[in-house]
Image (spheres, grey):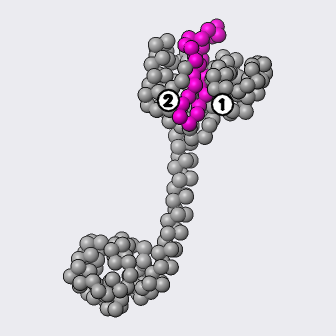
Amino acid sequence: MIYIGIDVAKDKHDCFITNSEGEALFNSFIIPNSADGFNDLYQKISSLTNDFSNVKVGLEATGHYNYNLLGFLIDKGLPTFVINPLHTNLFRKSLSLRQTKTDKVDAHTIALMMMSGVNLQSYSDTSYHNEELKSLTRYRFDKVKERAKLKTSVSRLVNILFPELEKFVPTLHMVSVYSLLAELPSSSQIASCHLTHLTKLLGTASKGRYGKEKAMEIRNAAR
């Protein structure tokens, strides 16, 4: 078996590769947190074996810093284990390794954890995508909240600057209204706008739904 320990950080990852006899197959090395770094690691692993069922890769759970590397390893078919940093720390202490925590020591410790047969569950493609979906769901939730705040802000400003506008549209939050306000953000600017230009602006934004009559209504109200 080949065991690989990776200590994950923001900009770079420390790596240690050993075999079942505890022989270091490479000197401890560092890869950048980039596609080039990931490929360098993969080439080193591939130079040792073509049978990835004989490989175990371990890395610490470090928030989002390990996502890209984790996805890369899974896509390459490498059995990968994500370890709680607390478990790594306890395991290192149990081995009486140096008390000083270093990246090289942690990479070595993770590799030894893989060797020890500690009851760890490999990270599957499904697990990875589930985490990605959770992340996207949280991101979408934040954006929905942000959008709601922006809509409230737009409504408040229109009620101050041109409250009559709401009478002529189903809702303020539509493409035609946003296009109108983006170019003509005040009632005075709408009032002084040439009717031909205003008609074209509303017609284009509403895909022909609003024409000259609607443009005249809105301009008259603005005046």
Region of the chain picked out in magenta, as a range = 1-28
Above/below status of 28 relative to 217: above
Q: Residue at x 55, y 58 (%)?
A: 142
The disc placed on residue 32 is: 2
Q: Residue at x 40, y 80 (%)?
A: 170
Q: In which quarter of the image is residue 15?
A: top right
As for residue 132 lying within the magenta part, the answer is no
User: Within 10 angstroms of label 2, few (less than 14), some, or many (20 or more) residues?
Assistant: some
Q: Which of 68 and 194 is in front in this view?
A: 194
Q: Given this view, does label 1 or label 2 mark the residue nearer the observer?
A: 2
Q: Residue at x 38, y 81 (%)?
A: 186
* Residue at mark 1: 83
- Residue 94's x, y, as percent? 78, 21
Q: Which structural element holds mark 2?
A: strand
Q: Which of marks 1 and 2 is nearer the N terminus?
A: 2
C-alpha distance separating marks 1 and 2: 20 Å
Q: Which structural element holds mark 1?
A: strand
